[in-house]
Image (cartoon, grey):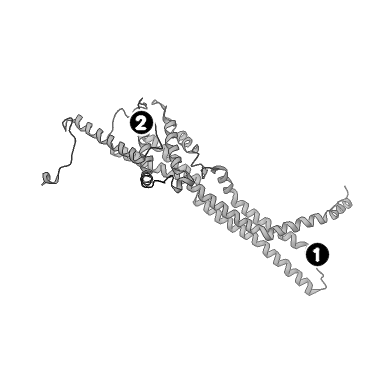
Amino acid sequence: MNEQAVVEQVVANKPLIEGFITGAALFAKELLLPSLVFLFILGAALRVLIFYTVKRSEWFAKELDKRINTFIESERPKSGLSFYVLMKELLERTYYELFEVRGIMRRRKLDYVMAPSDRFFMIQAGAAFLVKHSLKQIRFLRYGEERPKFLAISKAVFQNNPCFNRIFAVVPAAPVNEMINILPGLLIIGGIFGTFLGIMKALPELGGMNLSDAEGTKLVMDTFLLRISFSMGASVTGIFLSVMLTTLNAFMSPERVFASVVNRFELALELLWQACDNNQLPENLPKFDENRDPIAALAEYAVQQELAKQEKLEDDGSRPKGTVETKPKKEDAA
């Protein structure tokens, strides 16, 4: 194809090109800036929701870690401790104590069904899944020369949680989080795109200048510079929104929270594993029931602890069998 044919083809397509440029410039003028602002608001809102959703798993892991450390520091070393039984007890205590207040509210209100946070973020359901899935992962671990892969177990427990890995337990958080990570770059590209569209719209008008008409030429140049300055505003807006969203992503990073949760849970499992001697499963061990009343579960646990303390005192010989420790009355103390 020779040069003349190329020129003729460009001239023939000139109305189509001009129409595209006009439409693109109109979009940049009317809709680009609102679109950039909308994307920023949407990305920031989703970032906060994802961060809050992942933070709930860290909340449960911290509470479990507190109880494991309390057990390690307060209990004297014992022999014959089962890792599974002890872990099940600590997981259930953590779960029931965290939602003890909600159990009280459920008793006071006959129409109480679910807390608002549970209704939107499925916090209690997610915590129950952590308990059940953790027990499933450690159920068949064996004591031996090789240490169990607690890091892989921790990752599996938190990665497969359908409540803490989905926004409102519906929208998968991972792909949305990846889109938010690249959104600051898209905002900059959108602003630069708007600037170039404005320049494309303004440049053809320079061809209509008549250099012999000073006033007309000045008017054309003033209009051109005005449109260029307006187009540059799109780039400035895109850069500004990109910086703000990048800062928000840095302060509310779900990846950092997830890594902290996995490391905390792994260290807790390792610490408890070292304190136990076996991983035996008693035949009459009841299963975890997330629908059980937390108040009743904690009361039963307190009774069991008191009975175990009484039996220990009887075995030590410090109290005759069949007697129960009671606090002295005020008259006796006097």
Image-based side of 168 in relation to 92, left or right: right
Which image quadrant for residue 36?
A: bottom right
Element under label 2?
helix
Residue 251 is situated, as x and y percent measured from the top left of the image, at 49, 52
Looking at the image, which is closer to me, 4 or 157? 157
Local packing at callout 2 (Cα closer than 10 Å; few below 14, some 14-19, many 20+) is some
Quadrant of the image occupied by residue 96: top left
Q: Within 10 angstroms of label 1, few (less than 14), some, or many (20 or more) residues?
A: few
As rendered, which of 207 and 109 lies closer to the eye? 109
| Residue type marked 2 | Val
Q: Please tell me whether mark 1 sits on a helix, a strand or a loop.
A: helix
Residue visible at 55% across and 54% down in the picture: 245
Q: Which residue matches tag 2? A: 85
Judge whether 40 appears above or below 315 on screen: below
Q: Nearer the viewer, residue 17 or 260?
A: 17
**Measured Cα–Cα span from mark 2 to mark 1:** 84 Å
Q: Give the residue furthest to the bottom.
A: 215
In terms of depth relative to the viewer, which is nearer, 108 or 18? Answer: 108
Residue 19, disc:
none
Residue 333 locus on image (x, y percent)? 12, 45
Residue matched to label 1:
207
Query: In the drawing, does residue 226 fall left or right of residue 248?
Result: right
**Which one is closest to the eye, mark 2 or mark 1?**
2
Instruction: Tell which circle, 2 or 1, labels the residue nearer the N-terminal end.
Output: 2
- Under mark 1, the amino acid is Gly
Labels 2 & 1 near each other (Cβ < 8 A): no
Identify the residue at horizontal 17%, vertical 41% (top origin).
Answer: 327
Q: Position of residue 35 (x, y in %)?
A: 63, 56
Q: Examine the rendered structure and indicate whether residue 134 appears above or below residue 232.
A: above
Q: Quadrant of residue 242?
A: bottom right
60 sits left or right of 9 in the view: left
